[in-house]
Image (cartoon, rainbow, N blue to C red):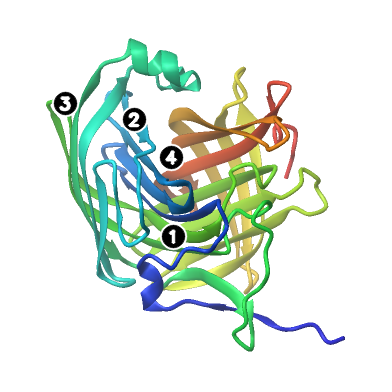
Amino acid sequence: MERKKIITVLDPSDEYPHEPDEAKNYNESMYFNTFDLSEEVGGWFRLGNRVNEGYAEMTICVYLPNGQIGFMFDRPQISNNRSMQAGGLSINVIEPFEALNLSYSGKVCLLEDPKQMADPRKAFNENPIVDCRISLDWTGMSPMYGGKPVYEDGSEIEISAEGSFAKAHYEQHGKMEGAIIVDKEELDINGLGLRDKSWGPRYWQSISWYRWLPMVFSPDFALMLSIISPDGSSEKVRRSGMVLEGNEYKIIEDCRIETTWDDDNYQTGMQCWAQTSDGKEYEITGEVLSLIPLRNRRKTPDGEKLLTRITEAMTRYQCNGEIGIGMSEYLDQIHDGLPSGRNFSG
């Protein structure tokens, strides 16, 4: 039997919320990061509507100039998927693929030692909770990368809700301008970064581990490297990404990430290599500037307790003689206290 050809589709309407699948774990999320290289400040922001479970996942993370981090996570109740607004965070599409606006009015936990968030209850109890206001405008500076995989005839690809992380996903590099106010400190933001959107069934425990490195060097030079291990084995590792040069993306066909670790198994730096489809190679080094460890916990129907750790690090990068900034996001399932991808090399 001839295998159906798979293509990737993306429409301006995908910038807006979709009709939810019937899957209980349906998730529709939008994410932004932005950083000012000269000041080494910035942040990332995410809203994930899990409407069939009756709540959203709302996260604010601001990297302040003195090494502090302002952080807030909440699961506000929602009853529909008609907008990306919950818990004080609002994301609005001004012009699909071109311009969006993000605003937040609420609180953040002000952390002198961000690694305290490994124990969230203790971190929130022992650190001040302060006011935070954010208003940022996003302008795309690249094409779109990704979309929804479908068969060539337009029919849907069946996926397992239990084993899914997303059925559609796209990313874009861009600029963010505006202000972030934490307590009495105001940051004027004129930053560069990356945004993404995904929708479909998601459990954070659906894959063994991943490494996601979005970085920006200038408005016309940026990269994203991704290595994903669905089951923990080295045989099924997926390597992908893109390089923005000028106003077009070159697709990364192969990449490697060698990580240096501290005693808590948090990344402190990385040596990376990537090759695009035209054969061009890129050598990249990364140095973590500020890191916060986050977690997601879930209990299976048979009572098994699952723990996922996601370390979110503002990271300085060097490539081709240029200095840039971005994120190193490491997701690992935790087994016997150790991250599942800790011993992977390459």
Going from N to C along the chain, the mark reached first, 2 or 3, is: 2
- The answer to whether residue 155 is visible is yes
Residue indicated by mark 1: 197
Q: Residue at x 74, y 83 (%)?
A: 4
Mark 4, Cα crowd under 10 Å, few <14 / some 14-19 / many 20+, is: many
Does 14 sit left or right of 268 as displayed?
A: left
Residue kind at label 1, given as amino acid type: Lys
In the figure, is residue 237 to the left or right of 270?
A: right
Helix, strand or loop at label 3? It is loop
| Residue at image mark 4 | 316
From the top left corner, tell me how far across and down residue 52 is, in percent: 48, 52
Of callouts 4 and 2, the N-terminal one? 2
* In the displayed structure image, the side of residue 151 where residue 117 appears, left or right: left
Q: Which one is in front, 213 or 316?
A: 213
- Local packing at callout 1 (Cα closer than 10 Å; few below 14, some 14-19, many 20+) is many
Under tag 4, what secondary structure?
A: strand
Q: Mark 2 Cα within 10 Å, few/some/many (few <14, many 20+)?
A: many
324 vs 205, left or right, is left
- Give the secondary structure at mark 2: strand
Kindly identify the amino acid type of the residue bearing the numbered disc 4: Arg
Query: Please, is residue 318 above or below residue 63 in the view?
Result: below
Residue contact at pointers 2 and 3, CB within 8 angstroms:
no
Residue 290 in the image: above or below residue 319: above
The circle on residue 183 is 3
- Given contact means CB atoms under 8 Å apart, are the residues at marks 3 and 4 in contact? no
